[in-house]
Image: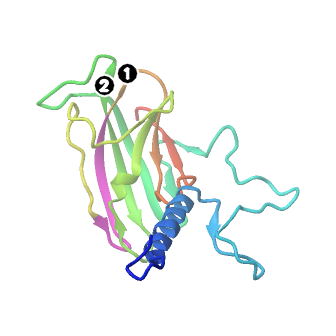
Amino acid sequence: MPNAAGGRRRISGVWTLVIFGSIGWWALGHPGYHVGGSSGAPALLQAPTQAKGSPSSTPSPSGPKVYAVGQTMTNGAHQTVTVTAFAQGVAASAFSTPSPGDQCVRVQVAEFNGDSSPWDLPLYELTVVDASGQSYDSLSSLDCPSSDSIDSLVPGGRAPASLYFEVPLSGRLLLQWTPSALNPNSVYNTELKAS
């Protein structure tokens, strides 16, 4: 755009921020890529490299390990989640009932923060996944009782919690723990069977 002196106006600072911000957001959604260069060669984005003959980092077709009720799942930050009990057919909330073909289930968990930093909103990392792959969080259904909440666990902190989910009446159910939204490939599963 011409300015008052007849030259072009520079808006490069704003556009640079928009462009690099967009690239950064894109890179967050594609954890295999990183911003930067290697061997002194400048690059905005580099694809992950894999040596010949090395195994792929993609999970096997069977997916991540599946834990049983009572087994402890531990992430790289030494935070743990243990499903201590599971119950199906839990009474609905006082305000509403589940949709036809659905039920309320209760998942009791015990969490421990073995990291040196506080673990914020640890229950938000837990969902239930049904046999078709649909995910359910404990906050979206008013048809089931209210779930417990934990704002934060300090280093060394422990807490039990009861979570309620509205899920289909039949089929396999997994409690899925995704410790980091920035790394959706880090997933832990516990098969939910009545204890």
Task: Identify whether 139 is placed above or below 167.
Answer: below
Task: Identify whether 51 is placed above or below 166.
Answer: below
Quadrant where the N terminus is found in the figure:
bottom left
> Element at badge 1?
loop
Which residue extends farthest top?
100
In the rendered image, which residue does mark 2 sit on?
Answer: 103
Instruction: Provide residue 185's location: percent of width, then percent of height.
Output: 57, 52
Mark 1 vs 2, N-terminal side: 2
Q: Residue at x 48, y 67 (%)?
A: 21
Image mark for residue 169: 1
Quarter of the image where one finds residue 163 = top left
Question: Which is nearer the eye, 110 or 62?
Answer: 62
Q: Amino acid at mark 2?
A: Gln
Magenta segment, prevailing SS (helix, strand or loop): strand
Q: Residue at x 31, y 42 (%)?
A: 138
Answer yes or no: is residue 75 visible: no
- Specify the color scheme: rainbow
Q: Amino acid at mark 1?
A: Leu
Q: Residue at x 28, y 46 (%)?
A: 162
Q: Residues within 10 Å of mark 2 (few under 14, many from 20)?
A: many
Instruction: Provide residue 72's location: percent of width, then percent of height.
Output: 49, 53
Q: Are marks 1 and 2 in contact (CB under 8 Å)?
A: yes
Question: Which is nearer the eye, 48 or 6?
Answer: 6
Instruction: Give the residues drawn in magenta, as a range.
Output: 152-165
Left or right: residue 141 compared with residue 173: left
Left or right: residue 152 compared with residue 53: left
> Element at badge 2?
strand
